[in-house]
Amino acid sequence: MCLTIFIYASFVASPHNILSFALPSQATITPTTTTTTISSSTSTSTSTSPSTSKKPTCIPFTIPDSRPFFDQEQSQLNLPPKLPNSSYEQVVQQLRSLRLIVVGCARNVGANVDNYRTHVDQIVDLFHPSSRVLIFESDSTDNTVVKLQNWTRAEVFSQGKLVPQIASRTDRLALCRNTLLTKAYNYTPDYILATDVDMFSTTVPSFLSNFYYNRDDWSVMTASITGGYYDIWALRTLSDNVMNYDVWHRIWHLHNNRKKYCNNDFVDLIILIHKKQIPVERDLIEVRSAFGGAGLYKVNSTYGCRYDGSRTTCEHVPFHLCMREKNRARIFINPRFLLR
């Protein structure tokens, strides 16, 4: 899960200007010339008076389309077709011969561990018995470590206090995810399920919806969530003109220039309009990057790529863009892969 930050930083450069600004017409100051003839004199006086119109002190900030990203996205015609029921059932049976490694970053999630464990165990049981759960923990001040250590299936890597060494949360998350990725490779898995420990809660049928589609046609299936798609920072749409920029960098830039605008509802217009529920019956949505609390990765699509949280960027984005460039990965949001 990418951090939603409500602090604006003046040092971050602006991303691409995707949004439009509605600029009102500039008032024109028109000089008026008046000629007065004085009977007792042959002289003529000329005076100039400005128009009463005033130059506007601010401009309204608007967006060209207020629909959520999944409605703005252009029709995608090259989506993977669904398998026949008989083929899907065969795929589910084949999972028993495939190895899954579940990975997650944990900090102060003691209250979530039992629920997380219940749902993860059900999914791991679908795969080969050698499948494992790997958890990277740091900086917890609650009972997270004790809860995780009582989970026999989980291998826990507790790192103590990282905040004093690595102040940036996105840098710490990148370290966590890269560490787990390397450790997962040691098990030579077929799939890696990356999860947010505090968010992951799904059913077996919901998870298995990822296998409605031929496994050769997709590289990553990312989750949706009940109540509204939330992970906008990790999102990059396939279309250039919808959501293919860093939303928080955009907001920071606008906030630094907020005196120009009559309204400052940047978060509402740039982020909140997209946080709507994706209909479950909707088809897959291909993207350049997404996460949404969980992502199922074919392991060979991840080779040669690393997470990067530098420059206060969501760590998932560089990882996914690398996968697309190096491994021709196809990444999807699966509305049926639903976290609750």
Image (cartoon, helix red, strand yellow):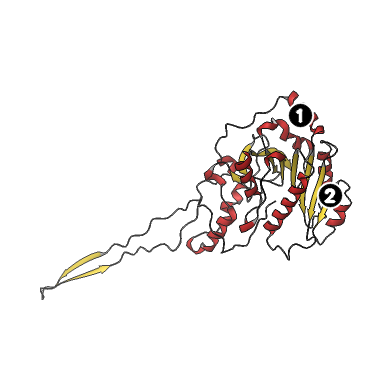
Q: Residue at x 84, y 44 (%)?
A: 118
Indicate the position of residue 19 as horizontal and vertical percent values: 51, 51
In the rendered view, would you say 103 is above or below 286?
below
What is the three-letter code of the residue carrying label 1? Val
* Residue, disc 2: 155
Indicate the position of residue 286 as horizontal and vertical percent values: 61, 38
Numbered circle sitting on residue 200: none
Disc nearer the start of the sequence (1/2): 1
Residue nearest the viewer, comparing 19 with 165: 165
Res. 16 visible in picture:
yes
Label 2: few (<14), some (14–19) or many (≥20) C-alpha neighbours in 10 Å:
some
For the residue labelled by badge 1, is the local secondary structure a helix, a strand or a loop?
helix
Indicate the position of residue 129 as horizontal and vertical percent values: 86, 38
Q: If the image is split into quadrants, where does the C terminus sit? A: top right
For the residue labelled by badge 2, is the local secondary structure a helix, a strand or a loop?
strand
Label 1: few (<14), some (14–19) or many (≥20) C-alpha neighbours in 10 Å:
some
Could you tell me how far apart the alpha carbons at marks 1 and 2 are, in whole angstroms? 28 Å
Residue nearest the viewer, comparing 268 with 189: 189
* Residue, disc 1: 91
Q: Which image quadrant for residue 188?
A: top right
Indicate the position of residue 13 as horizontal and vertical percent values: 54, 59
Judge from the rendering whether residue 157 lies leftward or rightward of residue 10; answer left or right.
right
Q: Residue at x 53, y 44 (%)?
A: 240
In the rendered view, would you say 113 is above or below 7?
above
What is the three-letter code of the residue carrying label 2? Glu
In the rendered view, would you say 127 is above or below 263?
above
- Which numbered mark, 1 or 2, is in the foreground of this view? 2
